[in-house]
Image (tube, rainbow, N blue to C red):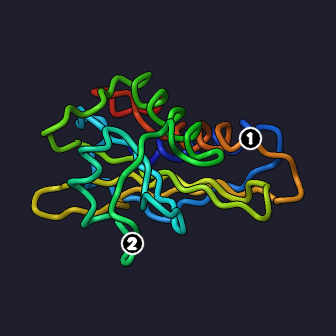
Amino acid sequence: MRRLALSVALSSALLLGGCARSELHVLAYSERLDLAERESFAVLGTQLGHERCWGFGEPAAVISVLAPRYRPPETPPEVGTPAEAPGALGGLLAAAREELEARGYRLVEVGETPGVVALIAHSTVGERTSRVGLHLGGAVGEVYRPDWISLANEVDPQDEADPEELLRELFAIVPTRGSGEPD
């Protein structure tokens, strides 16, 4: 039944189309990460090449604790807030938080371990968006993976694309908390 719900949600996401025609890719999907049973979340976006931070997200203190699982080698040690994120990343992190809260999840409290971490990836060619990724991870038993579910929405960088709309299309498969079904 879940596979059917995922298939329907992915088909719907492909039909939503924002400003530009997008192509959705399922890079990884494991039912082991039972999203609907998770309660809390954290959001994160890495920023390679930033002079001060390796990533931006919230809560920053929780993201700092998770750094060994997400921080690329030889990057600055700090975590910035979404408001400090460069370019479109801050808006993407805010959109991710909004989407998760609309589905009944709550932002993790400092000192807690998040039920799910939403890692947002934004790629550009020049100044234009070419890809937005959503990677959902967390602990399942003794195994922690940052990408139990990994999706990407790609567009031709020649087209005008709203990265937040591309991300919202990816969130179409995230179930409402407790329901097991996509919104």
What is the distance, in whole Å, between disc 1 and disc 2 at their CAs?
Answer: 27 Å
Q: Position of residue 19 (x, y in %)?
A: 82, 39
* Circle 2: residue type: Pro
- Residue at image location 59% in from the left, 48% down from the top: 86
Compared with 55, 116 (above or below) is above
Q: What element carries label 2?
A: loop
Determine which residue is flagged by label 2: 72
Residue mark closest to the camera, 1 vs 2: 2
Amino acid type at mark 1: Asp
Which labelled disc corresponds to residue 162? Answer: 1
Q: Which residue lies furthest to the right in this view?
A: 158
Q: Which residue sits at x=57%, y=41%? A: 92
- Who is closer to the viewer here, 20 or 172? 20
Q: Is residue 136 left or right of residue 20?
A: left
Question: What residue sits 26% from the left and 53% below the top?
Answer: 64
In the picture, measured across the screen, residue 120 lies left or right of residue 87, that is left
**Left or right: 140 in relation to 46:** left
Is tag 1's residue or tag 2's residue first in the polypeptide sequence? 2
How would you rate the neighbour count of disc 1 (Cα within 10 Å): few for under 14, some for 14-19, many for 20 or more?
some
- In the rendered view, does 35 fall on the left or right side of 183? left
98, 3: nearer the viewer: 98
